[in-house]
Image: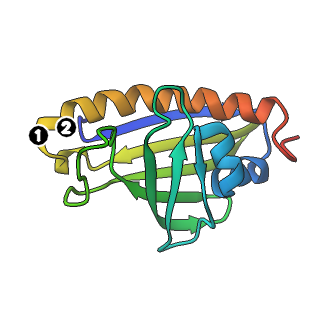
Amino acid sequence: MSADRIEKSVVLAAPRPAVWRALTRAEEFSAWFGATMTGPFVPGATVTGRITYPGYEHLTMTMVIERVEPEHLFSYRWHPNAIDPEANYSDEPMTLVEFRLTEVAGGTQLTVVESGFDGIPLARREQAFRENDGGWTEQMSNITRYLANGAPEAR
C-alpha cells in the first residue's frame, strides 16, 4: 500500500439507503464521526463543525464537499490531522476522502479512501498519514456501531 493513500473497508449490516444517510446528512455524520457538522453536504459547499472527540473539543473541522452521487459515492477534501490550533493549514493542499457504497450479501460494503498525502508538507506528512490511518480504522468501527445501535431508519 502506498504512503499516499489509506483504504479501509467494512461490510455493514444495513441497507445502502441507511448507510448513505449516515454519510451525507450532517446530523447523522456528526453522530458517528465525532463532530458537530453543519450542512447541507452538497458539491462545492464548505462545511465546518466543532470536533466532539474527547481531548479535541477545542478544534474545528472543515470539509469542502466534492462529489455526491446518491447511494454510490460521497467525497470531500480536508486538511488531514489539522490538530494544532496555532497552525494555519490554508496554504497546504487538502487530501481527498471518498466513501464508496456497494450492495453485498448481508448489507452494504463501505470503502473509504483518503489520498493525496504526498502533497502534505514533509514536516507533517508521516504523522498525518499515521494518525489518519488509525483514525479511519476507528471511524469504520464508529459507523458500524452507529448503524447497529439505532441510527434512524437503519433497519
The x and y percentages for residue 51 are 52, 41
The number of discs equals 2
The x and y percentages for residue 16 are 74, 49
- Asked if one can make out residue 1 in the rendered structure from this viewpoint, the answer is no
The residue that disc 2 covers is: 125
Q: Relative to 134, is 108 on the left or the right?
A: right
Q: Measure the C-alpha gap from mark 2 to mark 1.
A: 5 Å
Q: Relative to 126, is 85 on the left or the right?
A: right
Front residue of 49 and 66: 49
* Residue in view at x 18 percent, y 36 percent: 124
Q: Secondary structure at mark 1?
A: helix
Compared to residue 27, the image places residue 85 above or below, namely above
Q: How is the image coloured?
A: rainbow
* Residue in view at x 54 percent, y 31 percent: 53
The x and y percentages for residue 70 are 66, 65
Q: Relative to 100, is 126 on the left or the right?
A: left
Front residue of 111 and 63: 63
Q: Secondary structure at mark 2?
A: helix
Amino acid at dot 2: Arg
* Residue in view at x 38 percent, y 54 percent: 78
